[in-house]
């Protein structure tokens, strides 16, 4: 389903992405990024550093935020920039919700640029990550029938 | 410095590890139909990789597991965690590309945080493809506590 630019305004929420990090996922993410840091797979090492359990990698938060955006804008949309800050830890005990809100919309000739605020919360109220992104979406009959017709 | 040529299997394993089955990462025909030369790497992949070479033997890893070559000298021995990134995507990255990067530590400061004093190390990283085109800029923060 194509994104519809005529239905997006300041305050529009991106469909949230809810995910539950698992030990298998953290392990595979560490493996494929060649990340040997023990706090991501060795529970005792994580506890020794003062954490309750192994930690979700900062990079994994970014990858999942990007996935939320690309799931929403579709293959023809482009993520121009993505930034995020880790505000508190996340572990496999958490259920994480990625959400995004449109804060600025600029319509150009052939494309529309959207600025978004991003948030990841654990178990719906603890802030884990905050961030922002800029995405571009082409304007045509699929994304904005009224504009394309005019 | 030159990193190396990247392969489809590694970019697809990365996608699988984040449960992102976007056909742009897996289906050449689909990616071409969307204006790309072929499948692309998930955009956050390059900046998430901590080592491009075989890496040091286990005996040379730091006690926290980290690769000593991937950690700024002043942070060694501290308790580290990723603090986030600012990524700007300039051009698509394709499996088969040979990438290079330059990395620079641009800021190092100690701050009081909720959980005590912490050092924030900020690095600027730029990734280029074999044509010399800038594909990705990354500002990365590493948080370290005593």
Image (tube, coloured by chain):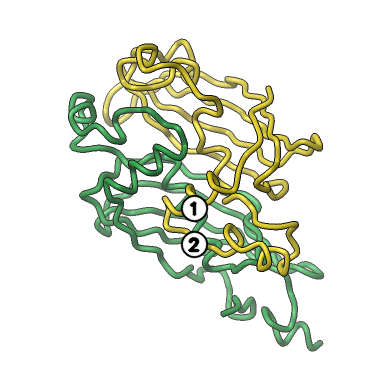
Chain colours: A green, B yellow
Q: Against A79, is A38 above or below?
A: above
Q: Residue at x 20, y 49 (%)?
A: A93
Question: Cβ–Cβ below 8 Å for labels 1 and 2?
Answer: yes
Q: Nearer the viewer, residue B47 or A148?
A: B47
Q: Residue at x 71, y 46 (%)?
A: B90
Q: Against A136, is A87 above or below?
A: above
Q: Which residue is mark 1?
A: B15
Q: Which residue is mark 2?
A: B21
The local secondary structure at tag 1 comes to helix
Question: Which image quarter: residue B111?
Answer: top left
Q: Against A34, is B14 above or below?
A: below
Whole-percent x, y for residue A146 in the image: 72, 87
Whole-percent x, y for residue A142 in the image: 69, 82
Q: Pointer 1 indicates a residue of which chain?
A: B
Whole-percent x, y for residue A67 in the image: 50, 58
Whole-percent x, y for residue B46 in the image: 58, 39
């Amino acid at each position: 389903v194509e994104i519809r630019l005529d239905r997006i305004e300041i305050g529009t929420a991106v469909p949230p992405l809810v995910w539950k990090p698992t030990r298998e996922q953290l392990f595979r993410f560490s493996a494929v990024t060649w990340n040997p840091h023990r706090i991501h797979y060795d529970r005792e090492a994580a506890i020794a550093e003062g954490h309750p359990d192994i930690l979700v990698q900062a990079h994994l938060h970014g990858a999942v935020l990007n996935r939320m955006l690309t799931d929403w804008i579709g293959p023809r949309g482009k993520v121009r920039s993505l930034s995020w800050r880790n505000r508190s830890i996340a572990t496999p005990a958490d259920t994480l919700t990625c959400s995004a809100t449109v804060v600025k919309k600029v319509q150009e000739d052939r494309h529309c640029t959207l600025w978004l605020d991003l948030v990841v919360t654990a178990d719906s109220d603890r802030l884990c990550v905050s961030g922002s992104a800029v995405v571009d979406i082409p304007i045509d009959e699929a994304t904005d029938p009224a504009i394309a017709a005019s | 410095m030159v990193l190396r040529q990247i392969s489809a299997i590694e970019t697809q394993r990365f996608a699988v590890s984040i449960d992102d089955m976007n056909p742009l990462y897996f289906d050449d025909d689909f990616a071409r139909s969307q204006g790309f030369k072929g499948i692309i790497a998930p955009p956050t992949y390059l900046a998430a990789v901590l080592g491009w070479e075989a890496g040091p033997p286990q005996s040379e890893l730091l006690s926290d597991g980290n690769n000593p070559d991937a950690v700024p000298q002043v942070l060694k021995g501290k308790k580290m965690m990723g603090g986030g990134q600012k990524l700007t995507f300039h051009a698509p990255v394709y499996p088969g590309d040979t990438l290079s990067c330059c990395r620079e530590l641009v800021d190092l400061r100690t701050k009081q945080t909720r959980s005590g004093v912490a050092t924030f190390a900020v690095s600027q990283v730029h990734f280029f493809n074999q044509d010399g085109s800038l594909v990705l800029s990354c500002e990365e923060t590493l948080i370290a506590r005593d």
